[in-house]
Image (spheres, rainbow, N blue to C red):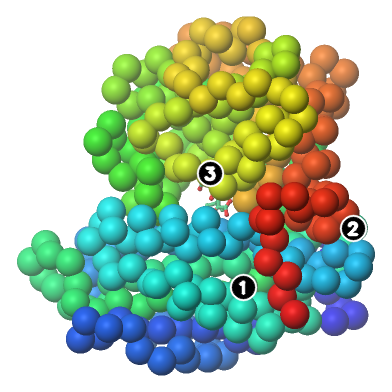
Amino acid sequence: MGNIDWGNLPFGYFKTDYNVRCYYRNGKWGKIEISSSEYVNIHIAATTLHYGQEAFEGMKVFRGKDGKVRVFRWEENAKRMQNSCRGIMMAEPPVDLFKEMMIKAIKLNEKYIPPPGLGAALYLRPLTIGTGPQVGVKPAEEYLFMIFVGPVGPYFKQGFSPVDVQIIHDYDRTAPHGTGQYKVGGNYAASLRPADRAKKEGFSTVLFLDSKENKYIDEAGPANFFGIKGNSYVTPNSTTILPSITNKSLRQIAEDLGMKVELRPVPETELDEFDEVGACGTAAVISPIKRIVDRDSGKEYKYCPDGKPGPVSTKLYHTLKGIQEGEIEDKHGWNLIIE
Ligand code: PLP
Ligand code: COI
């Protein structure tokens, strides 16, 4: 693939050769289908179009310097997909089916796995949609689980360099007893308007507060939030945020590095006390934050005095990437090597 500029890929859609699909009909999952079409032909009354029956995942595949291809913590994504499906009453793709389709999707598009060392990865996007028709508000009886893939670069165009984010009070991503812990399309629809405004106002993304009291940090639009205070890694626990697999991994890495991990509510007022803050997720990896501005009060919280990512975020970033790319021992067994 001599014509792909691997080192300058955006985080976006990239046409590859194949995607894989599987229908759930009459109470069971069918045969895996391989498709080279970028389109899905669905019923005009499909529940995904009307009532938002849609859940997705995001995962990355890396080619190491040793030539091996690794998928990071796929089983966590498979289980989270099941949880999201359960949350909005969709059929749950079995973990084994997820694995088989994932391996097929990777192997069929092997030539799109970026070479190591350029900050790129093959992104996998599994999704489940309600394809059966309903006009009354009811779950569908038919579902389609698919995986498409594409090479991507960093989510925030700055890559591993600090970004500015905006705290907002006039939009919620999800309700206190809503769907925040599920990776469902509706949550992202709710985030589009505030995220677009934040971009126009010069920020990379928004930081949502908890929607009940509007007092605690919830998460960033496409990523979880963490702060470093002395030797502690602090990250919000809240029922309205997506349980990030990257964050879970960083908590383990922090512990392995001898840090204390605090999973607890993080009030906005505590932002003054952190040495470093960042956003983390599959797409975002670690995006260090250099400035947080509260859009209502105008209060600014500043980090990275020399304009560079802080030392702890840097260590966490390189350790995570090192494990994913096969440079650092995978002592927790997080990678699946695709033979
Ligand atoms: N929070 C939201 C809202 C996300 O969309 C994502 C991305 O998947 C994350 C957090 C990070 O989760 P993960 O680390 O599992 O990719
Ligand atoms: C991811 O990190 O994989 C995400 O899904 C975040 C965003 C692109 C929705």
Q: Of the two numbered discs 2 and 1 on the same chain, state the one appearing first in sequence.
A: 2
Left or right: residue 162 versus residue 67 is: left
The answer to whether the residue bearing label 1 lies less than 8 angstroms from the nearest atom of ligand 2 is no
Using the image as rendered, state which of residue 49 and residue 334 is in the foreground.
334
Q: Confirm whether residue 218 shows in the render.
A: yes
Mark 3 and mark 1: span between their CA atoms?
20 Å
Residue indicated by mark 2: 117
Residue at 63% from the left image edge and 34% from the top image edge: 251
Residue indicated by mark 1: 149
- Residue 97 lies, with reference to residue 88, above or below; the image says below
Q: Position of residue 230 (x, y in %)?
A: 72, 12
Left or right: residue 196 versus residue 290 is: left
**Amino acid type, label 2:** Gly
Mark 2 and mark 1: span between their CA atoms?
20 Å
The answer to whether the residue bearing label 3 lies less than 8 angstroms from the nearest atom of ligand 1 is yes
Q: Secondary structure at mark 1?
A: strand
For the N terminus, the quadrant is bottom right
Residue indicated by mark 3: 244
